[in-house]
Amino acid sequence: MGSGSDPEHSPKEGEKQWRCRRSQRRLSRRMTIVMSASRVRLSSRQASSTNAIKTSKYNTFNFLPLNLFEQFQRIANAYFLILLLLQVIPAISSLSWFTTVVPLVLVLSVTAAKDATDDIVSMKRTLTLARLVQMRTKINPNQISLSSPPPLSETNLKVKQAVTVTGDMGDNIHNLASFNGEVSCEPPNNRLDRFTGTLTNAGQKYSLDNDKILLRGCTLRNTEWCFGLVLFGGPETKLMQNCGKTTFKRTSIDRLMNVLVLCIFGFLAFMCTILAIGNRIWEQLWGSEFTAFLPRQGGVDAPFSGFLTFWSYVIILNTVVPISLYVSVEVIRLGNSFYIDWDRKMYHAHSDTPAKARTTTLNEELGQIKYVFSDKTGTLTQNIMTFNKCSINGKSYGEVQMVHRKSYGDTVDWSFNPLADHHFSFHDHSLVEALKLESPEVQSFFRLLALCHTVMAEEKIEGELLYQAQSPDEGALVTAARNFGFVFRSRTPESVTIVEMGEQHSYELLAILDFNNVRKRMSVIVRSPEGKLCLYCKGADTMVYERLHQSCTKLMDVTTEHLNEFAGEGLRTLALAYKDLDEEYFSSWKQRHHEASTALEDREDKLDVLYEEIEKDLMLLGATAIEDKLQDGVPQTIEQLAKADIKIWVLTGDKQETAENIGYSCNMLREEMNDIFIVSANNSDDVRQELRSEGVTSEPHNPARLNTNTICPGFSSYPAYALERSMELLFLRTACLCKTVICCRVTPLQKAQVVELVKKYKQAVTLAIGDGANDVSMIKAAHIGVGISGQEGMQAVLSSDYSFAQFRFLERLLLVHGRWSYLRMCKFLRYFFYKNFTFTFVHFWYGFFCGFSAQTVYDEWFITLYNLVYTALPVLGMSLFDQDVNDMWSFQHPQLYVPGQMNQYFSKTAFFKCALHSIYSSVVLFFIPYAAMYDTVRDDGQDIADYQSFALLAQTCLVITLCLDMSYWTAVNHFFVWGSLVMFFTVTFTMYSNGTYLIIPASFPFIGTARNSLNQPNVWLTILLTSILCVLPVVAYRFLLIQLRPTINDKVGPLTNHTLQAKAAPPPLAHRVRIRHTSTRRSGYAFSHAAGYGDLVTSNRFLLKMARNKTFF
């Protein structure tokens, strides 16, 4: 049963067949799988579940109908489809069919191509792996290493073990194929941290837990193959159970546009109704005077004529509804996404990681962020742990490091230790001297670090050790012990081999009392080469202190002072203790431990009782301090974002003190902030009272740090009182009064709940940024999710909308790319609505002069090419290249970001102003040419006051006026604007020429109009006058607005001309020096928040006694 095998296919020898059936005991909700070598039979009550999953939306057959169905759910597309149907009715159609078909087909084609491309990429990600029970592996007989599946994407390798009864079969395929047994397990669910089941064989039951299960999507490491039994396949796997439905994210501008489109529909109906009423009145009063050459159709009276005219004007005025708007928006977003991908200033050379826009639909939302929710470890910090300081027997070591950090010569010389890791640096020589003087306390300290862990060691080359640790913290501690002369060399299930100051010793490993989120400590029981029994314990100081012997009181007080100093510097702390054991007592305890570890019920509770019994009366050795360094530029980035009025909340699973001190390091908390509010109550009533009292006394400038609960991340031991429905508004109100908010000990679900709470009640745009799998729910919940590709895998990146390698790049993403994208999109929308409304309103005014006959004021070809050719490039050029200030001045003036948060550039008010501007321009564009052409003759005396000459004049004035309405000129913009005007005149003269008329006379009736009209001086004077009257009042209004009500952009703009930008770069940001402080509240624990590998390490059957040069991963 290979990991990639199909359960329905069996080896030739001893063919394996499976019979699956659901247990009929509803209360137990368990699944039973019977393994048999005789037959295959599926229960009739259970449908067979295939192992196939589908991540694509379309296939070859359903793509076209399904995609068209989805596209026509857009109101604008459905509207134009209705228009196309109306145009085939001769009685109401006054336009040719191609005026609607061409833009509609273009829009549908571009969107379909984009959807197909996205779906092909999704389809390539489809996997065909299943959830397996591991039965046999190669290399280590019953043990494998693997990298985590996507829901748990972490960089540390995980160790899994095989079931005992199958592991003993070796690589005998015949025995495996003929194996008979029954697996009883839990039904499919999304719990990634736990699995419950039993394997029954020959009347004996074997326990199945999460250590014996391989999840779908895991990758085998250091193992060529493994045999397994498929328990869950396809959509029943844990991976698919956790996928869920990804919420489709839409920007606030998208939502606003939908509302505006509905308003436009209403306004269109209003205009068509007015024109229809006008047609009825005109037909009733004057229509009979024209029946001689415009005969009415039979049965068409004045009221019915008005009804038909209504639908005719629905067709003619269709340009007020922007069909090409959606395609143009997608093109603009795609272009701005490329800017992010191509930005070399967001490229991290060390990890060879560029910035990546993983979506093209949210760019402008980056310019409207009000709240940023950030993880701490790996996001603000590097998640690279270094052993920094320690306290041993009441003496603190490592202080010299803070003074001589810049002097490389002051680092400890590790030449005395041939097995040392030379990448490790330490500056306090007194600690090495104490080791060389054979201080018993110092030696016991590092002996504990070398023995009390679950690290695996690999030594392919003599002297070159590679440690694989469950967490970076544990790896840092073992590496520190290695450099100080206590080298962890190798392990077997029964022993741990270490080198103590050059001498190799083997300790008998008798038991591992493993870590979990409740114990917050781990212990090992070993027998020294001299036969001495000893228990070594390390863990959170609060947990260890409760179990110390009374004689340690004085030492505990001194160590507590040191821990306060360590916590004040933002270091992750850990307390160390030991206990000598009596041989007789341990024998009795060992027997009871064996009975508890093999119990099928309440196993964990029984083991916890035994652990508590033996972990008491400990002797304190000291404490360690590990530094999780900040990423480069984090304090400066947070300070810049704060100046841009962006609220930053840190949501972390770390302890209260660690988060608080990281807050100081990041400049989120500052020394001048004396009033730090802490919510730390352990019941709902007390939490409510604290929130109420602070809500009354707080002022908006007061900082606060809110500890929402006391929960280890991922395991809810206590309720999150502040997030209860009855208290969430009070919590939010109090938090929003604060300048800084840090939520500690929160689970991934609670992170998402905080984000949803702000989204629900604050109506603000949110951004979540993280680097680990525990940040995925938060990233998906926020309007925009940003993933950092760091030490905790790629799951955050895979679930994000944007990704990069360092937190500092968030500043450029928001203040530069986000602001530019928002500014460009808003200018585009204002310009787009303005040009379409102006174009349409000219039709409306013309209706009053043509007897409301639904006659078009423009040539049909001009109507078709207006949005596609004549005005497409200028608006795209503006939307892709427009800048108010360059990136340097965006950093110098972060306040430029504020207008985006307040929706100042595009809103319902801005849309209304745009409509008024269009009404004015349309009045000028219609009535000035109309008055100029009225009773006008050419130079040769011939009349040019005809419909076709007027249409050409109105078209020309419209295109010139719109193309020249630019505020930011670049070489590309010049090319687009002047190229569009050249294209307009070229196409116009071509279509109005004799040649095109002779080819298709019915389609090109404007023969000779261009050469007869555009060679007259009065026509060009009319064009000039119309353009000036369109532009001059607008320029005057904008000038007065800048003088009377200047915005931040108006104030900064004059300072940022190109000459000044070239000569004077913005000064660098001032570096804020953090004053050292201490913290008196600690519950430090430096381990990963996951259960350890003690059971695996001590399993006598599941780890071979291998030579040092073998792989132990």
Image (cartoon, grey):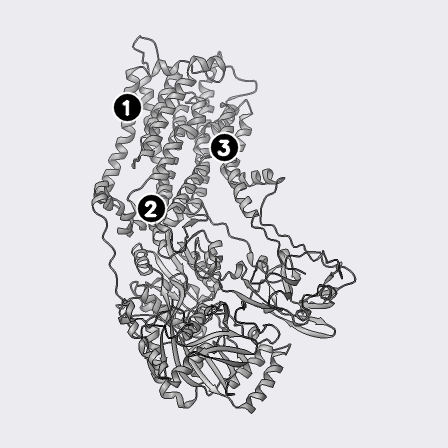
Q: Quadrant of residue 412?
A: bottom left
Nearest to N terminus: mark 1 or mark 2: 2
Determine which residue is flagged by label 2.
904
Q: CA distance from mark 1 to mark 2?
A: 33 Å
On screen, residue 165 above or below 1046 = below
* Residue at horizontal 79 percent and vertical 62 percent from the top: 38
**Circle 3 Cα neighbour tier, 10 Å, few/some/many (<14 / 14–19 / ≥20):** some
Determine which residue is flagged by label 1.
1024
Q: Can the viewer see residue 289?
A: no
Under circle 2, the secondary element is loop
On screen, residue 1083 above or below 823 = below
On screen, residue 552 above or below 722 = below
Q: CA distance from mark 2 to mark 3?
A: 33 Å
The label number, if any, that marks residue 106 in the structure image: 3
- 267 or 1057, nearer to the observer: 1057
Q: Can the viewer see residue 457?
A: yes
